Image (cartoon, rainbow, N blue to C red):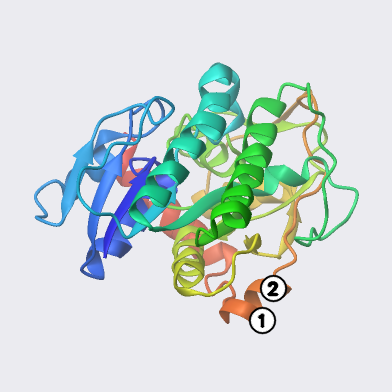
Amino acid sequence: MKILITGGAGFIGSHLIEALLNADHFVICVDNFITGLEENIAPFRKNANFELVTKDISKEVPANEKIDYVLSFASPASPVDYMKHPIETLKAGAFGTYNALELALKHKASFLLASTSEVYGDPEVNPQPETYWGNVNSIGPRSVYDEAKRFAEAVAFAYLRKYSLDVKVVRIFNTYGERMRSVDGRAIPNFIDQALKGDELTVYGDGSQTRSFCYVADMIRGILKLMESEGAGPINIGNPVEMTVLALAKKIKEITKSASSIVFKDLPVNDPKQRRPDITKAKNELAWRPEVDLDEGLKRTIEWFKKNNK
């Protein structure tokens, strides 16, 4: 297939491109590098089946040739990024998704939206099933990302209903692995970077808030299975093994053999108290479940950080 992916220079996007190229698809990556990295896609530049288009997808999603599949992955995704780029985040979720959908409609292509567990906000239900409508502060500091993704889901399903467009929506839960930026701002890259440098590990609040972490290879398998499926979703892809943020900090400190101390800082506004996917739907409809446990995934990620973040 000829596949266009927006945000392909990002963490998950670049891993997805690698998998698609390995499966002999032709991939067009559209990115303006607001948070994506050139080095993420540098290994693909010599591949005859890879094309890079440097564009802001909130203005246009260009493609002159026939496209078979459009993957919408463009958006700042970490709190550090979307609070630094709030308007750009909203534009990516709104105009960017609309432009990607229009392109899919023009080419009669399939469309997959990378949504997020953030649509559930600070959940009052745990674990979070796809039927849960969420608990989002629509004007809080995190709303620029939360509401952008909620709108993106709404407009995707509007195209499905009005035009019978082949639409699929994946709700991505916390994902980690190689190619994460040390300045990403999320827990795992933060803790790894701090531990390797011997800096204090920064835990927000008392660390009792819970998260679950999915290794990137498992996430890519889930996305590819959804691409090939008949269902529209939304469908949760993530690892349901839950742990506290403090326990995560201690685990990374132990694996890295770091002498760093752990310090506590004020919890950010509207930071979710818990985040854990119900993956029953993914198991039943996609025959997917995570395979890489946290210890193994962290070891791989830490080794990558040691080699690539000098």
Residue 212 place in picture, x, y as percent: 68, 56
Location of residue 150 (image quadrant)? top right
Number of dots carrying numbers: 2
Residue beneath disc 2: 281
- Residue sitting nearer the eye, 162 or 8: 162
The image quadrant that residue 238 belongs to is: bottom right
Q: Mark 1 packing: few (<14 Cα in 10 Å), some, or many (20+)?
A: few
Q: Nearer the viewer, residue 75 or 80?
A: 75
Measuring 56% from the left and 18% from the top, which residue is drawn there? 87
Q: Can you say whether 296 is above or below 250 in the image?
A: below
Which residue appears at 79% of the width and 24% of the height?
269
As helix, strand or loop, the secondary structure at mark 1 comes to helix
Given contact means CB atoms under 8 Å apart, are the residues at marks 2 and 1 in contact? yes
The numbered mark at residue 284 is 1
Tell me the amino acid under the disc marked 1: Asn
Residue 120 visible in the picture = yes
Task: Report the quarter where the N terminus lies.
Answer: bottom left
Assess disc 2: are there few (<14), some (14-19) or many (≥20) residues with their C-alpha within 10 Å of its C-alpha.
some
Residue 144 drawn at (x, y percent): 65, 26
Cα separation between marks 2 and 1: 5 Å
